[in-house]
Amino acid sequence: MDKIVVLSGAGMSADSGLKTFRDADGLWEDHDIRQVATPRAWEADKELVLDFYNQRRKQAFDAIPHAGHKALANLEAKYEVTVVTQNIDSLHEQAGSTEVVHLHGEISKVRSEEDPSLIYNIGGDSVDVGDTADDGAQLRPHVVWFGEPVPNMEKASALVSAADILIVIGTSLVVYPAAGLQEFANPAILKYIIDPANPELTDYSEWKHIRKTAEEGTPSLVSELLNRYR
């Protein structure tokens, strides 16, 4: 069974109504990312950071997977599929994808600010200053902030290296370290990118470009790939 690795980014979630900071020149829902998405921001104003993520958590909890998410789950009928996502929502899982690697964490979870192994799934609930983990430390969002290491990068790199087909959806692949994942792919494999705009890739000629949104382009590509085995 061929292995497909999907790299999904902000455009995938945007089609379900979730915004990202890149939509408005570094503003994330009217917040400067330096005020809400860095370790320094957390130390400076925990209440502001928690409030920001409480709002985003509620939005993500209410979001619904679109046709693109569901199509990727259908690929598992004929392929071994792993989704490596930069998104912190659970839309891929809700749509039925069974193997999802979150590079930047998960908004539905929180963890101890002192012990990263103490992780709790809270769904769409809020967290306030004074809410603590089992070790007594303040709970913080279980997300990777700017300036923090990305724990799943090594795992994601290995997955891309072993892929027979690589699909990139809704990401420009220009923000590192996630942008470097494409470089681990075998040059001989099939590579697709779904993006209505021209992708910012080093060697765009190697890719089959589907000039559609994630919601529109993913189902058509999935249909093409499934038809290979009819």
Image (tube, rainbow, N blue to C red):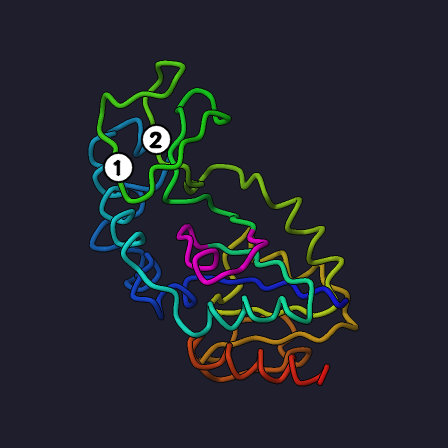
Residue lying at 62% horizontally and 84% vertically, measured from the top left: 224
- Say what amino acid the circle numbered 2 marks: Arg
Q: Is residue 159 left or right of residue 197?
A: right
Q: Which region is colored magenta? A: 87-100
Q: Secondary structure at mark 1?
A: helix
Q: Nearer the viewer, mark 2 or mark 1?
A: 2
Specify few, some or many for label 1: CA neighbours under 10 Å numbering under 14, 14-19, or 20 or more: many
Query: Which one is earlier in the sequence, the residue at label 2 or at label 1?
Result: 1
Disc 2, disc 1: CB below 8 Å? yes
Residue 202 drawn above or below residue 88? below
Question: Does 152 sit left or right of 229 as displayed?
Answer: left
Membership of 44 in magenta stretch: no
Whether residue 204 is situated above or below residue 171 in the rendered picture: below
User: Where residue 117 sits in the image (x, y, percent)?
Assistant: 51, 26
Residue 140: assigned label = 2
Q: Residue visible at 24% across and 42% down?
A: 54
Query: How far across and down, in percent of the image, does residue 94 sit?
Result: 43, 57
The residue closer to the viewer here, 40 or 65, is 65
Q: Which residue is mark 1?
A: 49
Residue 86 location in percent, x, y? Answer: 48, 54
* Kind of residue indicated by mark 1: Val
